[in-house]
Image (cartoon, coloured by chain):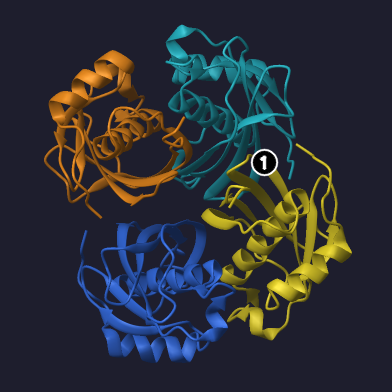
Chain colours: A cyan, B yellow, C blue, D orange
Amino acid sequence: MTSPLKMNREEMILFLEKEFPQYLGEITEVAEAYSLLRLPVDTSHLRPGGTVSGPTMMALADVAIYVALLSKIGPVALAVTTDFTCHFLNKPQADKALMAKARLLKQGKRLIIGEVELYSEGDAETLVAHVVASYSVPPKTN
Amino acid sequence: MTSPLKMNREEMILFLEKEFPQYLGEITEVAEAYSLLRLPVDTSHLRPGGTVSGPTMMALADVAIYVALLSKIGPVALAVTTDFTCHFLNKPQADKALMAKARLLKQGKRLIIGEVELYSEGDAETLVAHVVASYSVPPKTN
Amino acid sequence: MTSPLKMNREEMILFLEKEFPQYLGEITEVAEAYSLLRLPVDTSHLRPGGTVSGPTMMALADVAIYVALLSKIGPVALAVTTDFTCHFLNKPQADKALMAKARLLKQGKRLIIGEVELYSEGDAETLVAHVVASYSVPPKTN
Amino acid sequence: MTSPLKMNREEMILFLEKEFPQYLGEITEVAEAYSLLRLPVDTSHLRPGGTVSGPTMMALADVAIYVALLSKIGPVALAVTTDFTCHFLNKPQADKALMAKARLLKQGKRLIIGEVELYSEGDAETLVAHVVASYSVPPKTN
């Protein structure tokens, strides 16, 4: 399910830095089929045992779907997460950046649903987590 | 995440007909990367408004992941669903068979997690539903 | 979160028998705080091993939230399930009816979210499954 | 589903401060029926619009179930989140602490499933979010 982009990577970075300055991760790619984010892992993200914490992974996935969503509907809308489901699959590598690749499953007028695959940089075959989340989009005439 | 098959399509059909005779759908493909099921839609699956009911879609997805799982671990194990999350995305077409394409996201010793994309036959680009579900697998020495 | 009822048990049964005749379960209670459904278990619901199938439990839970929702917004609206998450907790008793107790977690104008506890009749302390699901409600002026 | 406590509030705080020092929130109650956490909200948790961010709510809920789980199985086990589902229900109040009340739905030998209700302090009737999550517990003989 791909529709044309309304924001490219540069526009996305400018928008997020202005509106959402504390966002997690770097915007690596904004493409029609998906958006890709990268989180350099430092010790503040690590749990005892040397693994990235679940909440850090969920926070990165949330930004990744938000980026995929904005890239398709443009910077005007205020989207709100309504549900968020994460399955933790494998332990991420502590010395590799965490990647989050998001694509939209549904782009409705009021409800947008996206999916994220998280993996350690360089090993996209071994998913560390999988997320599906829904976002409510306000009507345009609001 | 693909591992070799322990059951092919013919073995799967024989196994299900013996152990789980009321199963929903036809086994279309059993491959390393995915399993594909097909449900010919008749009026018993339809809701008022001419759409396949949500519980029918979820039941088909449950069988689809079960098939993908059995194809990888073989016919011996008794797997139990532990969680099941479905997002309904688009209305399926009432006059087309419902397809369910399942792949495993994680194949652990105790926990297997799979994903299903559901679509109306001939239109794999428009997902009608998306499922992620976990299955608990008993230890081998049981 | 309780709001007044717009349909009582008798009105609910008449409505469902007319609009949704194949619905699963008996409507036991329609109250402000919750709705309660009861499914007499017969062999058609049983899997090998003598347990009620997961899809049967999910189908009953779907009706239970739908009843709770209709009781609060009235019989006019056409609600559509948008997401459905089930956790399977304990094996239900094969010789007891399955009960589904639903309450609404959120009653928004466009989105209604409900929760269901499933248990075997007479043993409400031992949950057999737990469901959270969202329903999209069309605007009133449609 | 209540079983006796293996850790009280003071033991829990000591354990978390040693093993998991960056944990979010204050441990308010550790009881047989539930555990209650409290997060004083400051500006670092706020999004534009003055609301607590979704990831902050999910992180607090994750700790709350972890506390409920440890209180029942004791401080020895290393539990790992396997799935996490959150529904966002209402906007939390920006000037009130966020409360997270967790209870266990299932306490199995290998799998523990818990539920969390999140609300703004003083308004437990209006849920701001609802979480269900599963934790895998390693065998005791590890």
Q: Is residue D34 visible?
A: yes
Q: Position of residue C3 (x, y in %)?
A: 21, 66
Q: Position of residue B83 (x, y in %)?
A: 51, 53
Q: Disc 1 designates what residue?
A: B107
Q: Is residue A91 above or below residue B55?
A: above
Kind of residue at badge 1:
Gln
Which one is nearer the viewer's eye here, D12 or D115?
D12
Q: Position of residue C104 (x, y in %)?
A: 31, 62
Which one is nearer the viewer's eye here, C34 or D141?
D141
Please give the name of the residue rendered at 50% of the width and 19% of the height, measured from the top-left corner: A52
Crowding near the residue tagged with mark 1, few <14, some 14–19, many ≥20 C-alpha atoms within 10 Å? many
Please give the name of the residue rendered at 34% of the width and 46% of the height, measured from the top-left corner: D114
Q: Is residue D81 above or below residue A44?
A: below
Which one is nearer the viewer's eye here, B89 or B71?
B71
Q: Quadrant of residue C111?
A: bottom left
Name the side, left or right, on which C128 lies relative to C6.
right
Q: Is residue A133 above or below residue C85?
A: above
Q: Quadrant of residue D92?
A: top left
Image quarter in which the C terminus of chain A is found: top left
Name the side, left or right, on which D83 lies relative to D27.
right
Image quarter in which the N terminus of chain A is found: top right
Disc tally is 1
